Amino acid sequence: MSDPKPFDPLAGRDPAAPLDEETQYLFEDAVRRMPKCELHLHHEGAAPPDFIRQLASEKSINLSGIFDRDGGYAYADFPDFLRVYEAATQVLKTPEDYHRLTLAVLEQSAEHGVIYCESFLSPDFCGGGDVSAWREYLAAIEDAAGIAERAHGITLRGIVTAVRHFGPETAKRSALCAAETAGEFITGFGMGGDETMGHQGDFAYAFDMAREAHLKLTTHAGEFGGPESIREAIRDLRVVRIGHGVRAIEDMALVEEIAARGIVLEVCPGSNVALGLYPDIAAHPIKRLQEAGVNVTVSTDDPPFFHTDMTDEFVQLHKSFGWGIPEFCALGHSAIAAAFCSEPLRARLKKQMETN
Ligand code: ADE
Ligand code: ZN
């Protein structure tokens, strides 16, 4: 574990002693300020509900049925979450909309100390899988990312993402978009969506195409699918990271394999609790996975949907497992090491993590 540079209000305290109100405040403030790296964030899933409502009203689109009484997103379970997600995404119709979305998302992340973020970008939502349209959306997203970087010191990289329940043929179109735009900004290819549909291997062609374009690979596995889905992802898609992957804990031989291969898990504890995988963070397997030698990182997935942010993820991990600033620094370093970015950028981020 590296020597933490951020101010640590808990340093030298008995870890078992409860925090008084002032120390709790100082701790949460220190957690919020410390530099962070987030590897698993869905671009549309990070859209604040107010932002989506504003766009809907500008375009006279009726979005009734996707918000609760407090104005947050309302859904009953995972399939319903995907329905609401895609309904909200319907208001994002132009590159300009994605420009505005990118500014809103990055400003929000930077408020929680995020200095580097990888977000999932789907050509299905950005131009319907057409390469020329995708290039226009991407140009808008990159332009906004540049503005946010200058204003808030946050760097964005994109992982082109197939949506599993749209099927393997649609995934091939996304992979082609990814391959055509691979470079300093688009650095990875992945897959989200309904993990219970088909098999990971059904998408091998798309992942092979992305690999040939030198993109790094990740897929959602072991969230709503069990250990077998993770085995398939490793065997058939040859991913180096896995989105979630937490259900590996149901098969300790698989946990050992993940650890031995150095596959990194993009763990999103708040998302897993909000979507009903675990009753609370205390029951979440992140600590057991880490203790078994798995390289875990922490992300928010779709923060407004799950009423979370990077600060809250860490604060909840403190409350359940007693993790503090040194553990969060170590998680940040794991994320930087696993980032799908160029080596010069990785070196710069590492330095920033160590000196802030
Ligand atoms: N798309 C957005 N969030 C997702 C999640 N948690 N799992 C699968 N697909 C998603
Ligand atoms: Zn996800």
Image (spheres, helix red, strand yellow):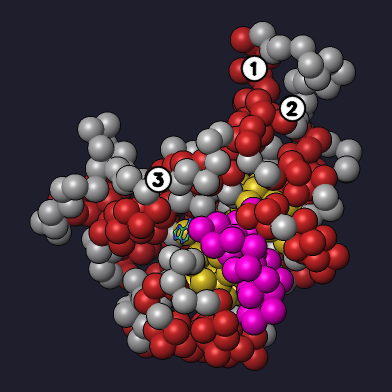
Say which of 204 and 4 sits in front: 204
Give percent across and percent down for residue 198.
47, 76
- Label at residue 322: 2
Q: Secondary structure at mark 1?
A: helix
SS for dot 3: helix
Instruction: Residue 176: tell me if it is visible.
Output: yes
Label 2 or label 1, whichever lies nearer to me, is 2
In which quadrant is the C terminus drawn?
Answer: top right
**Mark positioned earlier in the residue sequence (3 or 2):** 3
Q: Name the residue that disc number 1 marks.
A: 24
- Place residue 94 in its image quadrant: bottom left
Kind of residue at disc 1: Gln
The boundaries of the magenta stretch are: 221-246
Q: Magenta stretch containing residue 288, yes or no?
A: no
Q: Which residue lies under the disc numbered 3?
A: 305
Vertical relation: 286 (above or below) 280: below
Pinpoint residue 39: horizontal percent, then vertical percent: 62, 58
